[in-house]
Image (cartoon, coloured by chain):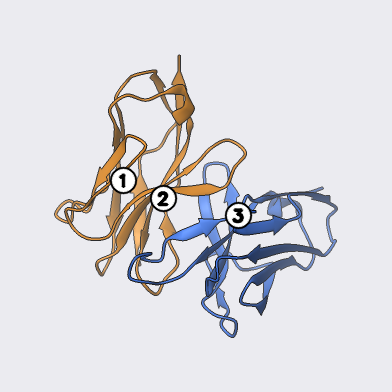
Amino acid sequence: GDSVTQMEGPVTLSEEAFLTINCTYTATGYPSLFWYVQYPGEGLQLLLKATKADDKGSNKGFEATYRKETTSFHLEKGSVQVSDSAVYFCALSDPNTPLVFGKGTRLSVIA
Amino acid sequence: DADVTQTPRNRITKTGKRIMLECSQTKGHDRMYWYRQDPGLGLRLIYYSFDVKDINKGEISDGYSVSRQAQAKFSLSLESAIPNQTALYFCATSDLTASSYNEQFFGPGTRLTVL
């Protein structure tokens, strides 16, 4: 079945550092790909998405590109802030199945 | 007002008690989901429903049941709670359209503690 693998955390960075969180997937079809973010004490909210190969999703300075050839959707940000501290989830969706989530990566940004 | 609401937000109960967690949505979505979140395990799907007459088991349905009372309401029950059901529970909704691609919208979560 479909699956998502993302790098384990926790990841600790200094403010203004470059962030990469790796995500790879296995799917039989052509899924849509998502990054969700969970801030402390809150539910998950969509950060960005990409619906076909070579699409780039972006939001709040974060970016991820749908790479079909490497089955990857890595999350990047050029300069993280303390307010980016959260848990990040990579997920995929086929039209007739629920989202399949990775296990999440906790990011801590220190000033 | 929030589009997806969950009640209660926090609940402490004892082993063997019956517990119901409720989810309501105003997004008009057909699809609804229940997940649990445990530290280090991400989100695991308990049950999902693609419309009012449709109920499907997820990855970890044992010990849980659900009821889809209406398009807007989806309840999760623990018939006889046990301590390893202590977790954070999330409800989510989605709608499959050309623009949404089955994007899911989450409620704020219910923190359940079973003593």
Task: Give me the C-alpha separation between circle 2 and circle 1.
Answer: 8 Å
Specify the colour of chain B.
blue
Q: Residue at x 42, y 33 (%)?
A: A9
Alpha-carbon distance for marks 2 and 3?
19 Å
Image position, residue A69 (x, y; %): 14, 54
Could you say where residue B95 lies in the image, as x and y percent from the top left? 46, 70
Q: Position of residue A107 (x, y in %)?
A: 44, 30
Looking at the picture, which amino acid does disc 2 mark? Gly
Q: Is residue B50 above or below residue B1?
A: below
In the image, which disc is placed on residue A102?
2
Label 3 or label 1, whichever lies nearer to me, is: 3
Question: Between tags 2 and 3, which lies in front?
Answer: 3
Q: Chain of mark 3?
A: B
Left or right placement of residue A52 versus residue B63 in this view: left
Q: Residues within 10 Å of mark 3 (few under 14, many from 20)?
A: many
Q: CA distance from mark 3 to mark 1?
A: 24 Å
In this rendered view, identify the residue nearer to me: B110 or B87.
Answer: B110
Q: Specify which label sits upstream in the sequence, 2 or 1.
A: 1
What crowding class fits label 1: few (fewer than 14 Cα within 10 Å), some (14-19), or many (20 or more)? many
Q: Say which residue label 3 marks.
A: B107
- Quarter of the image for the N terminus of chain B: give it: bottom right
For residue B22, side relative to residue A37 (left or right): right
CB contact under 8 Å: marks 2 and 1:
yes
Q: What is the display colour for chain A?
A: orange
Residue A5 visible here: yes
- Residue type pointed to by label 1: Cys
Same chain shared by disc 2 and disc 3: no
In the rendered structure, find residue A23 and report the number of the disc placed on it. 1
A71, B2: nearer the viewer: B2
